[in-house]
Image (cartoon, rainbow, N blue to C red):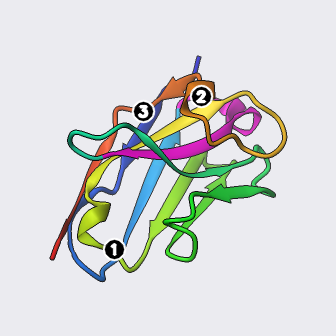
């Protein structure tokens, strides 16, 4: 089992940037593909981005392509989400998640086994 702890959320003005971090508890971090999801009030949790075990493959939801960047540092057991050009509609709780799956990282939240507690991102217009 792996524990995930997100950080880096907060209040930012529209057009600004934030970098979210997700630290994993286990040294076997590199055996997990990682994903970022978000959930706005009254909405379902939705896929944002994912990255393969090695970091060599990434996947993004169309809405975030070009604005958000996912990366990972396996030596630090951490995955990041760099968010630029933030909009008010990006306001949500952001979650990181881990899956054992190989290959192209999945966008399906039901295929992720472990989840963090979430970090709030609020973008003011």
Classify mark 3: residues with Cα within 10 Å, few (<14), some (14-19) or many (20+): many
Q: Secondary structure at mark 3?
A: loop
Per the image, the residue denoted by label 3 is 116
> What residue sits 49% from the left and 65% below the top?
63
> What residue sits 58% from the left and 22% below the top?
113
- Give the image quarter of residue 11: bottom left
Residue 44 horizontal side relative to residue 101, left or right? left
Classify mark 1: residues with Cα within 10 Å, few (<14), some (14-19) or many (20+): many
Q: In the picture shown, does residue 17 fall above or below 110?
A: below
Q: Earlier in the sequence, mark 2 or mark 1?
A: 1
Q: Secondary structure at mark 1?
A: loop
Per the image, the residue denoted by label 1 is 86
* Residue 35 belongs to magenta span: yes
Residue 92 horizontal side relative to residue 98, left or right? left
Residue 20's label in the rendered image is none
Instruction: Magenta stretch: give its range.
Output: 25-39
- Where does residue 4 sit, x and y in percent of width and height? 47, 33
- Where does residue 49 sit, x and y in percent of width and height? 57, 54
- Are discs 3 and 1 less than 8 Å apart at CB? no
Q: Nearer the viewer, residue 25 or 72?
A: 72
Per the image, the residue denoted by label 2 is 112
């Amino acid at each position: 089992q792996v524990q995930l702890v997100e950080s880096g959320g907060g209040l930012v003005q529209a057009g600004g940037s934030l970098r979210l971090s997700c630290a994993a508890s286990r040294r076997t971090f590199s055996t997990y593909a990682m994903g970022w999801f978000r959930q706005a009030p009254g909405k379902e949790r939705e896929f944002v981005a994912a990255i393969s075990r090695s970091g060599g493959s990434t996947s993004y939801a169309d809405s975030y392509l070009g604005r958000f960047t996912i990366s990972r540092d396996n030596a630090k057991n951490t995955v990041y989400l760099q968010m630029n050009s933030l909009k008010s509609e990006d306001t949500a709780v952001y979650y990181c998640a881990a899956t054992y799956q190989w290959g192209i990282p999945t966008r399906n939240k039901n295929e992720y086994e472990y989840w963090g507690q979430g970090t709030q991102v609020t973008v003011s217009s």
